[in-house]
Image (cartoon, grey):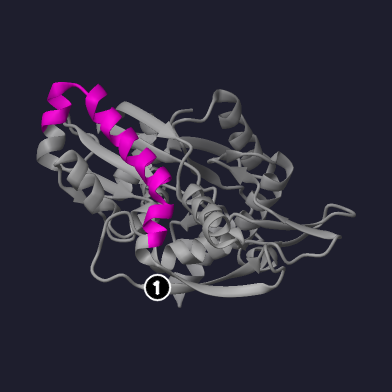
């Protein structure tokens, strides 16, 4: 009881916060609570006055189902801010939801960002957080945060490769001595896979489906490499020829072929990174293997496909979706010793 009392008092005087501001989902880590929030990066806004109607899970339920006075939007595109004002409101909402309303000190925050974003885009992330009443904002590249979150000893003079497959981007990095020795990012991730399924259903089956139906199909039977069995799932949408709703069964093999283009792009950036990495670091990677993190790591067989193409062992950590936010939280916990890993 006393521990809880002192914890509440401490939170009133301010606490630090780690955030993985993702295209598909935003995750928040509070030191006293762990991963406190994991919700879709979606905001529903009233078009008349710009008032926020819902954020996160509630807003996702409205996506594609709103009337003329309300629109549900995804303010981040390909890992960067596409709608500054809406992102500002979303960050503010998540911070208020995560922290005490009666705190006296605004939090310090570490935010994971893709390696591909520009200085202008970095500034937009910082300004959005500062406008949400954060006193101090530090940015860390997502693959570095993912490496820390996966338990990789990034401070050692040895090479480790991390592939972080998010909703909007895929980051590939080779870490050594607390820095990224080589890094590359492409704006291909889980969203591209969803869109590939949507296109496939329209072109092959004349079935127009929503982006979240494409995501549901990917989660249910999406794969990058043949696995045991050939499961199927019912996909629902609008038949563009008849103009009436329809449901039809699609197989795992079919969806794997539909996702082939974005999956191939991810494998290609991995191969390119290996080619451009120094021989010494490549020797370390051969010994240590490759770590696959992010929501894309949950795509069945993606690790096996990368293993087949590279000849290297691929490891998927427990809860790969949490790797970035856990890494950002680790930086917060030992900020004085780890602040050099931040990019600002």
Residue 185, percent from left and from top: 41, 33
- For the residue pair 234 and 121, the one nearer the viewer reads as 234
| Residue appearing at x 39%, y 61% in the figure | 254
Residue 61 appears in view: yes
Residue range highlighted in magenta = 254-283
The total of numbered circles placed on residues is: 1
Image vertical order of residue 123 relative to residue 142, above or below:
above
Query: In this orientation, which residue lies closer to the viewer: 192 or 121?
Result: 192
User: Can residue 151 be spotted in the picture?
Assistant: no
Q: Along the horizontal axis of the image, is 221 left or right of 66?
A: left
Q: Is residue 256 magenta?
A: yes
| Left or right position of 11 against 224 | right
Q: Answer with the quarter of the image where residue 171 lies.
A: top left
Q: Which residue is mark 1?
A: 232
Image position of 324 with respect to 98: above or below: above
**Element assignment for label 1:** strand
Quarter location, residue 41: bottom right
Residue 238 in the image: x percent, y percent?
A: 66, 67
């Amino acid at each position: 009881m006393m521990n809880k009392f002192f914890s509440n008092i401490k939170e009133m005087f301010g606490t630090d916060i780690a955030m993985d501001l993702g295209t598909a989902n935003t995750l928040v880590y509070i030191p006293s609570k762990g991963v406190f929030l994991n919700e879709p990066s979606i905001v529903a806004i009233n078009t008349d006055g710009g008032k926020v109607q819902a954020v996160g899970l509630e807003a996702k339920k409205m996506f594609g189902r709103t009337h003329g006075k309300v629109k549900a939007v995804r303010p981040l595109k390909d890992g960067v801010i596409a709608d500054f004002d809406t992102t500002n409101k979303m960050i503010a909402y998540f911070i208020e939801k995560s922290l005490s309303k009666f705190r006296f000190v605004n939090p310090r925050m570490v935010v994971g960002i893709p390696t591909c974003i520009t200085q202008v885009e970095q500034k937009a992330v910082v300004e959005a957080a500062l406008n949400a009443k954060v006193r101090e904002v530090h940015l860390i590249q997502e693959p570095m945060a993912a490496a820390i979150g996966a338990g990789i000893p990034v401070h050692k003079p040895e090479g480790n490769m991390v592939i972080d497959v998010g909703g909007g981007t895929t980051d590939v990095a080779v870490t050594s001595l607390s820095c990224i020795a080589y890094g590359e990012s492409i704006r291909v991730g889980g969203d591209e896979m969803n869109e590939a399924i949507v296109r496939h259903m329209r072109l092959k089956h004349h079935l127009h489906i929503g982006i979240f139906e494409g995501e549901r199909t990917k989660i249910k039977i999406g794969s990058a490499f043949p696995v045991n069995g050939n499961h199927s799932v019912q996909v629902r949408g609008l038949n563009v020829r008849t103009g009436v709703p329809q449901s039809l069964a699609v197989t795992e093999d079919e969806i794997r072929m539909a996702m082939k283009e974005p999956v191939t792009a991810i494998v290609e950036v991995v191969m390119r990174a290996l080619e451009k990495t120094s021989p010494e670091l490549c020797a370390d990677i051969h010994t240590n293997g490759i770590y696959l993190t992010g929501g894309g790591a949950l795509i069945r067989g993606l690790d096996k496909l990368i293993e087949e193409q590279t000849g290297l062992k691929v490891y998927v950590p427990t809860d790969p979706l949490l790797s970035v936010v856990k890494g950002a939280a680790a930086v917060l916990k030992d900020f004085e010793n780890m602040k050099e890993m931040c990019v600002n």
